[in-house]
């Protein structure tokens, strides 16, 4: 706690360690009748009470000679958080999020008395609250135990589990808020809504053959006699409770990627919170989030926020800046210094994950003074300053570790903490780009990657080819890549002859009617299909054997002759190339475009590059959900398809789209390609290390064997239980062991024997491509290892532990 001679001034989110100078600075005191206060790592000091400069001196303390007045300020958030600590063992990991969220609410509550001014700034306030809510979504792919042991800050906004199929707390809260809006619209007929479940969705959903009624808005809304209703203005679907359960519909929406994204749900929640606060209904605002919180920490947070609401709190701010809108000059100075220290910390000779992440941050933020324009809220500025300082400290620590014989555990934990810092910095970049209303458009970024000269001096498109293809290009986006693919398929109503190449994402076939799987791009049966989906680098780790698919060979197979004239008879074809495990700037993409160009121009081919932007494109940060498609066709021949795509277009928050566009643009190309190449090299190295001991068909005393994958650019390694081990364990012949038995035993051993082997490392159960750190996933009959950007020493440690786990499992069989 600062002493009397050096009093810290709190700039709402950033602690300045310089002595307060009050002789020439006028201080004003704001009192929030709703309580709540901003916090960061120094909140513990505020919890005990700080000496602040203020008006009449407190009789409880004596003012130092250089301060004209003092008083003891009690931190109401600190008192409230003590209640949270009593009610949940996870209070430590919730602490930062709780103080940050409550503090922003406090600042908003203190402005609510001036309704006109508050409403003028409501759009900005919504963005602030959305940022706080999205901060709680960062751990959506972490199990609670992993998050705790890795010192990850968490919130109770995310329900147990991981992946897109998990309904988050914000989705539940958004449903509540939309329901409230619907009740207001129904007025005296509000009781009709009691018969329906309300689902925030990306677009209208056909379900179980029920008649779907589409409404543009809520004017003259009447639900009597309806079964399934989609309301465009609110993007919600109402379905009779007698026809569906929450879990059934939730699973259906998740499998198709049609649930409203976390970002959209945060937007809905923030809009509702700001509206209630502007009306003076602070308690109502807090209650509206009740359904967002889940698990044993839910009650603790709800009680903590309510407790904070009850008692007033005093907040000191400088008159020169509004902490909800901008930062003081001194705070910006500390930010600039922290940024420079981080960029100049010296990464030469340090591991790739440090160097590459700092390069990306430098590109995204650029000049820090320009980045902070036209304004940077003090709360956000404080978070960014603290995180940049943390990152600089971790780089310094890495330099010390590099000169010593550090253990794998130490490097793994440092990498995890650095990744956490990068997530927080990217979160601020996403916020500030949206706040300032700047950034490239997704179309321009995608077009530049596809049609500009490629990196590395490799042969690309000629200027004439690029100009011609540019005229044939349309870029679409959706909240999820699966939703984007479903939209594409649904926009071709007359085409139901679907083929997909083996090894693709396991949920893809479920989107189509009677799809047929082909192993090779040269299969004669493909020529008869009018909708073909392939992944050049297959993503289905559940299969025991996988190989790459050559898209150029597929184009030549489907169109054996280059047609110079327009479409004149044979069936048109749509080819969807899912490049989620690739980069749009790779040479293979241009080679495919060159091969496809004459067939696109003829009107025969509708070529689509589909990509999920959720993990890899974000440098592994996992901040937003988005899928996008680059569509090349001769529009006169595909006019109905194009019109249907526009009609079915889904909502994506502008901030999400802008952030992804920035990640895809400019100099970031070389950093992203380096990232991908590092993952591929790591994958090849780990496979080599594992195959030396547990190759497919080995005869050693080990329960695991590596599955076959001949794709040289794959990003994962998978393994399974050997036939011999299964037969001995289940006491059957190898031929008698069923897939269900294999999967059940694999899942049991994965949880009980495999994951515990890694409990002192940062590699966890997350099961997705693109993260900085290697992750695992149980995939039915196999286990998938998706590589990150670690150094070889950690990969060797992973290999050693995987082999040891398999040997340990086998030794248990010998004991039996």
Image: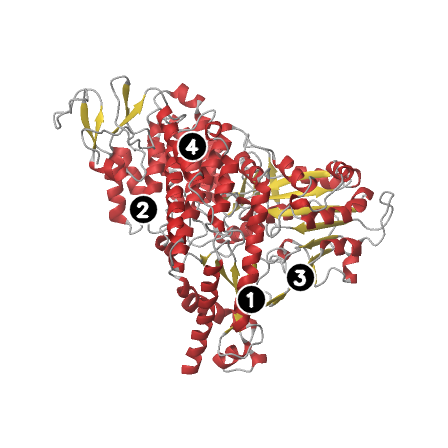
Badge 4: residue crowd in 10 Å (few <14, some 14–19, many ≥20): many
Badge 2: residue crowd in 10 Å (few <14, some 14–19, many ≥20): some
Q: In the image, which is nearer the foreground, mark 1 or mark 2?
A: 1
Q: Quadrant of residue 769?
A: bottom right
Q: Quadrant of the N terminus?
A: top left
Tell me the residue that label 4 is attached to.
Answer: 128
Q: Nearer the viewer, residue 441 or 363?
A: 363
Question: In the image, 682: left or right of 520?
Answer: left
Q: Quadrant of the C terminus?
A: bottom left
Tell me the residue that label 1 is attached to.
Answer: 688
| N-term mark: 1 or 3 | 3
Q: In the image, which is nearer the foreground, mark 3 or mark 2?
A: 3
Res 399 label: none
Q: At 53% from the left edge and 82% from the top edge, which residue is drawn?
A: 732
> Up-down: is 521 above or below 668?
below
Q: In the image, which is nearer the foreground, mark 2 or mark 4?
A: 4
Tell me the residue that label 3 is attached to.
Answer: 502
**Residue 740 seen in the current view:** no
Question: In the image, 805: left or right of 105?
Answer: right
**Residue 785 seen in the current view:** yes
Tell me the residue that label 2 is attached to.
Answer: 299
Q: Contact (CB < 8 A) between labels 1 and 3?
A: no
């Amino acid at each position: 706690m600062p002493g009397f001679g050096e009093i810290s001034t709190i700039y709402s989110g950033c602690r300045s360690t310089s002595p307060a100078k009050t002789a020439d600075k006028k201080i004003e005191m704001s009192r929030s009748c709703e309580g709540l206060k901003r916090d960061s790592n120094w909140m513990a000091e505020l919890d005990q009470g700080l000496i602040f400069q203020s008006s009449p001196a407190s009789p409880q303390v004596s003012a130092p000679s250089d301060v004209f007045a003092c008083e003891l300020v009690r931190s109401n958030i600190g008192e409230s958080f003590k209640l949270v600590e009593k009610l949940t063992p996870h209070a430590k990991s919730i602490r930062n999020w709780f103080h940050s969220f409550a503090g922003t609410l406090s600042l908003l509550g203190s402005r609510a008395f001036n309704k006109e001014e508050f409403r003028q700034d409501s759009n900005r306030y919504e963005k602030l609250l959305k940022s706080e809510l999205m901060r709680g979504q960062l751990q959506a792919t972490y199990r609670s135990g992993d998050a705790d042991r890795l010192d990850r800050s968490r919130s109770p906004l995310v329900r147990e589990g991981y992946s897109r199929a998990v309904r988050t707390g914000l989705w539940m809260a958004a449903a509540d808020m939309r329901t409230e809006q619907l009740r207001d619209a129904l007025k005296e007929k509000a009781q009709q809504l009691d018969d329906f479940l309300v689902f925030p969705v990306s677009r209208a959903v056909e379900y179980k053959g029920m008649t779907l009624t589409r409404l543009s808005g809520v004017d003259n809304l009447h639900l009597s006699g309806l079964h399934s209703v989609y309301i465009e203005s609110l993007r919600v679907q109402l379905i009779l409770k007698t026809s569906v359960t929450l879990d059934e519909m939730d699973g259906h929406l998740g499998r198709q990627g049609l649930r409203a994204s976390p970002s959209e749900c945060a937007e809905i929640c923030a809009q509702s919170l700001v509206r209630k606060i502007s009306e003076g209904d602070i308690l109502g605002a807090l209650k509206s989030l009740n359904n967002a919180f889940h698990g044993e920490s839910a009650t603790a947070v709800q009680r903590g926020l309510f407790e904070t609401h009850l008692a007033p709190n005093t907040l000191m701010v400088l008159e020169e800046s509004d902490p909800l809108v901008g930062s003081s000059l001194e705070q910006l100075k500390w930010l600039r210094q922290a940024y420079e220290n981080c960029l100049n910390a010296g990464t030469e000779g340090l591991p790739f994950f440090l160097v590459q992440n700092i390069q990306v941050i430098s590109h995204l933020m650029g000049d820090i003074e320009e980045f902070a324009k036209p304004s940077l809220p003090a709360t956000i500025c404080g978070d960014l300053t603290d995180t940049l300082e943390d990152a600089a400290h971790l780089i310094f620590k890495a330099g010390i570790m590099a000169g010593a014989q550090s253990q794998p555990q130490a490097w793994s934990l440092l990498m995890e903490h650095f990744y956490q810092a990068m997530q927080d910095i990217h979160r601020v970049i996403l916020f500030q780009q949206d706040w300032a209303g700047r950034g490239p458009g997704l179309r321009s970024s995608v077009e530049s990657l596809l049609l500009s000269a490629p990196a590395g001096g490799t042969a690309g498109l000629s200027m004439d080819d690029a100009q011609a293809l540019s005229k044939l290009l349309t870029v679409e986006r959706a909240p999820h890549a699966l939703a984007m693919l479903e939209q594409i398929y649904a926009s071709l109503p007359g085409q139901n002859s679907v083929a997909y190449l083996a090894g693709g994402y396991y949920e893809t076939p479920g989107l189509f009617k009677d799809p047929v799987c082909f192993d090779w791009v040269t299969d004669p049966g493909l020529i008869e299909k009018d909708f073909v989906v392939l992944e050049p680098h297959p993503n289905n780790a559940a299969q025991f054997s996988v190989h790459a698919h050559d898209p150029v060979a597929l184009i030549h197979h489907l169109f054996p002759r280059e047609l110079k004239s327009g479409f004149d008879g044979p069936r048109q074809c749509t080819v969807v190339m899912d490049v989620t495990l690739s980069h749009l700037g790779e040479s293979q993409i241009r080679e495919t475009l060159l091969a496809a160009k004459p067939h696109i121009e003829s009107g025969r081919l509708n070529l689509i590059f589909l990509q999920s932007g959720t993990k890899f494109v974000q440098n592994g940060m996992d901040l937003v959900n988005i899928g996008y498609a680059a569509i090349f066709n001769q529009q006169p021949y595909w006019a109905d398809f194009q019109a249907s795509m526009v009609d079915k277009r889904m909502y994506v928050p502008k901030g999400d789209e802008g952030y992804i566009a920035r990640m895809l643009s400019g100099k970031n190309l070389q950093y992203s390609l380096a990232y991908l190449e590092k993952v591929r090299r790591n994958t090849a190295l780990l496979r080599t290390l594992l195959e030396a001991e547990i190759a497919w068909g080995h005869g050693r005393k080990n329960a695991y064997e590596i599955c076959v994958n001949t794709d040289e650019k794959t990003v994962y390694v998978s393994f399974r239980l050997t036939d011999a081990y299964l037969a001995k364990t289940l006491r059957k012949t190898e031929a008698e062991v069923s897939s269900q038995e294999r999967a059940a035993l694999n899942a049991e051993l994965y949880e009980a024997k495999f994951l515990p082997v890694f409990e002192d490392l940062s590699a966890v159960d997350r099961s997705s491509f693109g993260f900085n750190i290697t992750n695992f996933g149980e995939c039915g009959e196999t286990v998938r290892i998706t590589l990150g950007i670690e150094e070889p020493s950690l990969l060797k440690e992973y290999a050693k532990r995987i082999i040891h786990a398999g040997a340990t499992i086998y030794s248990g069989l010998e004991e039996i």
